[in-house]
Image (cartoon, rainbow, N blue to C red):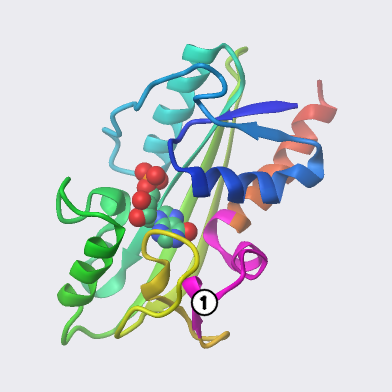
Amino acid sequence: MKLVLASQNKKKLVEMNDILSGLGIEVCSQAEAGVNLEPEETGTTFEENSLIKARAVMEASGLPAIADDSGLCVDALKGAPGVYSARYGGDGLDDVARYRLLLENMQGQMPRTAKFVSVITCCFPNGDVITARGECPGTIAFAAMGEGGFGYDPVFFVPSLKKTFAQLTPEEKNAISHRGKALKIFQEKLEVYLRSK
Ligand code: IMP
């Protein structure tokens, strides 16, 4: 089965394929499906934005489309950056500038607890929708550590492993991450859905 990923993020594509390939599912990029589209994320929840993206790409491609809307919610910042994680600090910033801004905004703040959230939505051309949510708790490190991953990974510290997400191998990250958990729940729901067809 082939799903189109409603995202331009190549690292998300790799993570999705790593996790779903065991199920015989191939996740292809929007470019491979001939879809050039970046739907505006006008929702105020991960659920809303995930649905907006999956539905737009399903309608444009005519194929089942899967979207992940994810972000980092920091307790001391009242849940920010949350659904605005990719846009934190405005358009001009890259990943490094964004996590540096977060470290700056966390100076003197307590507690440093946070969570990553991922909501996966799959929209089928017949109107069916599958949704799954995963969360991963952690804390905001005092300085960036590690070279792996993307986004806020270098500043997201997992106390039980004493490492940031950027210091984990892809397998270690997938085993505990918000996206890994959401994809596992998604996988289970998809199996039930496909059996019912
Ligand atoms: P989205 O592509 O609109 O869902 O934006 C999600 C944003 O949240 C990304 O641009 C990253 O900044 C952040 N993010 C989501 N998942 C991760 C992750 O696994 N590691 C690091 N940052 C993440």
The residue shown at (51%, 16%) is: 34
Where residue 35 appears, as percent x and y from the top left, is 47, 18
Residue 175: within the magenta?
A: yes
Near mark 1 (Cα within 10 A), the count class, few <14, some 14-19 or many ≥20, is many
Q: Is residue 18 above or below residue 144?
A: above
Disc 1 marks which amino acid?
Gln
The residue shown at (17%, 83%) is: 107
Where residue 187 appears, as percent x and y from the top left, is 71, 44
Magenta residues (range): 163-179
Q: Which residue is mark 1?
A: 167
Q: Is residue 190 above or below residue 56?
A: below
Q: In which quarter of the view is residue 42 placed? A: top left
Q: Is residue 80 left or right of residue 105?
A: right
The residue shown at (61%, 57%) is: 180
Where residue 43 appears, as percent x and y from the top left, is 30, 36
The residue shown at (50%, 24%) is: 31
**Magenta portion: prevailing SS class:** helix
Q: In which quarter of the view is residue 33 placed? A: top right
Q: Is residue 35 above or below residue 86?
A: above
Residue 176: within the magenta?
A: yes
Q: In what quadrant of the picture does the C terminus appear?
A: top right
Q: Secondary structure at mark 1?
A: helix
Q: Is residue 147 left or right of residue 120?
A: left
Q: Nearer the viewer, residue 160 or 149?
A: 149
Q: Is residue 30 above or below residue 59?
A: below
